[in-house]
Amino acid sequence: MSDIREWLDRLYSNSPGYFGITAFAGGRPRKTQWFATSRIDAAEKVINKYADKADLYLSVGTHIEPQETRGGEKTIISIPGFWADLDIGEVGHKPASLPNPGDEVEALSIVDGLPEPSMLMHSGGGLQAFWIFDSPWVFNEPADKAQAKQAIQEWGNLLENKGQLLGFHVDKVADLARILRVPGSINHKEGLKRPVQIRWLNKPSHNKDELKDLGIPDTYEVPTIVEPAEDDFPLSWNEILAPHGYTQCSETTWTRPGKKCDEGISLSIPDFATFVITNFSSSDPLLPPGAGTKLTKLRLYALLNHAGDIDKAKKSLPKRKLKVTWANTIEQKPVHWMWDGRIALGTLALLAGREGIGKSTLAYTLVADITRGTLPGAHFGKPKTVIIVATEDDWSFTIIPRLNAAKADLTRVARVEPTDADEYGVSLPRDVEELSILAKEHGTALILLDPLMSRVDAKLDTHKDSEVRKALEPLVKMASESEAAVLGLLHVNKSGSTDPLTSLMGSRAFSAVARAVLYVVEDSENREVKVMGQPKNNLGRSDLPDLTYSLSQVTVGEWEDEIITSVALTWGQDRAAGSIRTMLSTKTTSKSKMELAEEWLESYLAENGKTPSKVVKEVGEAEGYNDRLLQRAFNELNGKVSKEGFPAVSYWELPNLLEPAEDSVAPWEI
């Protein structure tokens, strides 16, 4: 029996259902072929045939039946054991707050002290370990799956914790539908061809319950040794290195003791992650051998002064000091406006309103005016560059026609997106530094985030003030330093509130951090007219008139004899300040409490998806809707109730928001 077949046999031979092999090309899934667990021979043939033609992945768990794509947790019916994905080095991996292990020895140190993995494979970019159960964990009841999901998450917590204690980043691959590399295939990331090789496959299996008991619950606070911000660590890189004989060759490079700068660099700070330093030396007795090993300041300090003992290093660090700046030494400056009186340079502003009301058209009209130098403000008469980060609308079909309709100078409009094909859009706060560099380099007057909510890192909860601030406060600092205004488009909820700021989607931190909030409503007497007010203007007047506009379809060009149209904005008559509050009040009072409850509940579940009913009722009560009213509203919406876990927890969701199947993709011939 070949090693590949033995590997597959150990994963699946005693499991029910089907497993899938998915082919990726260009970083995207192209086709998944499914095999009954009794047809491991057929799967092996496919692997051997296509191993060097695409990146191959297999589903660790088995599914109840073949899926159109690679499937999700809903169809998983068993898992063969627990697993770990331990990245090595930095090639092909996303930058993280901690460095990855530098080699296999360091990677294996993360699982040292745990039961030995039954199978181990080198994925070309790291190690993938499997702890195979004595028999597969088969999900006969929903409660079985809920317990397994919790167990695999707690196993992920355990590995993450062990990695952090050693100063390493560990990916938390804690989902039941996880796919991992296929042995015998090729890893093509970064244009390289690295073989996926089995290290061992016949170590003992394990008792499921004994492994479960090792997991760390989500309530456990994982200790961290990360000091990712440069200013948070009390010593500079050179203050750490110089006492041990290292020579600084430039602002970001050093040589090891006994070596001159013209003989080659030993350590360097990478541009993409200034909170770590890369060791390239293989002959430095004080540090782990190089080949890309990355060290945080704390870990470097611990290695050089305390034989790697992090706890001792922390205790020996000099305390951070606070400095005093007297107010009479700080120069006062006037506010300069990007849009006269409404949006200040170097600040964050929001443009909010319901879907379909023309927020984006209004925003792109401002963009066009800036690129032509016709927007009243500091740049009037001086055309400036605008950076646009947009993911909801297609550039060719929507954004370019919209800009042309507004008569923008397209040579001054920059589309910005990550170069990594695996990434979906700019992420806050991760990409703030890069945005700052681009804004300064191109003399940018405005950065448009359309929409803002989608730019917040997926790991941050947009309903928690503290987490929203983690994304927005670095953005505000960047705006101030670059003197570019940032305009974020934001949807509103259906709470029925007459206060525009209260109706903004997500945490109240969005409106709290922004210096200005523009808000658009539909005119209560003429639906063709939209009204833009300014419920918040920290740096300017509070009595600015509300502006009105209307939208009309215009022709912007042709393509192969087809007319291309878009929507253009036409400004109307100004109105007295505060008119939008009157219109919101009129709309609210015309609706019954039941209608308002339905609107609020539909909006909340649309944004948050499946949510414990207890949580929904607690949030709803804070908005003024009691349990009975919410239950009636839920029934009117034909909401779906489900129960998970043990003891069972009741969940609410909308019927049209159930997990959709993944979009089908072009066939990959297998």
Image (cartoon, rainbow, N blue to C red):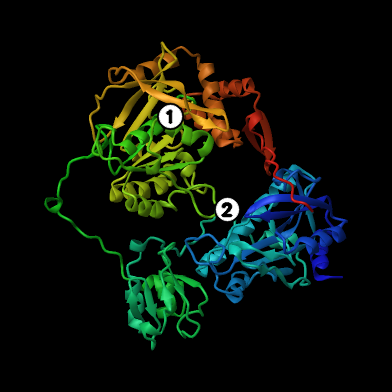
Residue 172, quarter of the rendered image: bottom right
Q: Secondary structure at mark 1?
A: helix
User: In the image, 126: left or right of 277?
Assistant: right
Q: Secondary structure at mark 2?
A: loop
Q: Residue at x 24, y 35 (%)?
A: 377
Residue 362, quarter of the rendered image: top left
Q: Residue at x 43, y 50 (%)?
A: 429
Is 162 in front, or is 331? 331
The numbered mark at residue 405 is 1
Q: Which residue is mark 2?
A: 422
Residue 648, quarter of the rendered image: top right
Label 2 sits on what residue type? Asp
Work out whether 383 lies above or below 602: below
Work out whether 20 lies above or below 464: below
Residue 14 percent location from the top left of the image: 85, 58
User: In the image, 568: left or right of 423?
Assistant: left
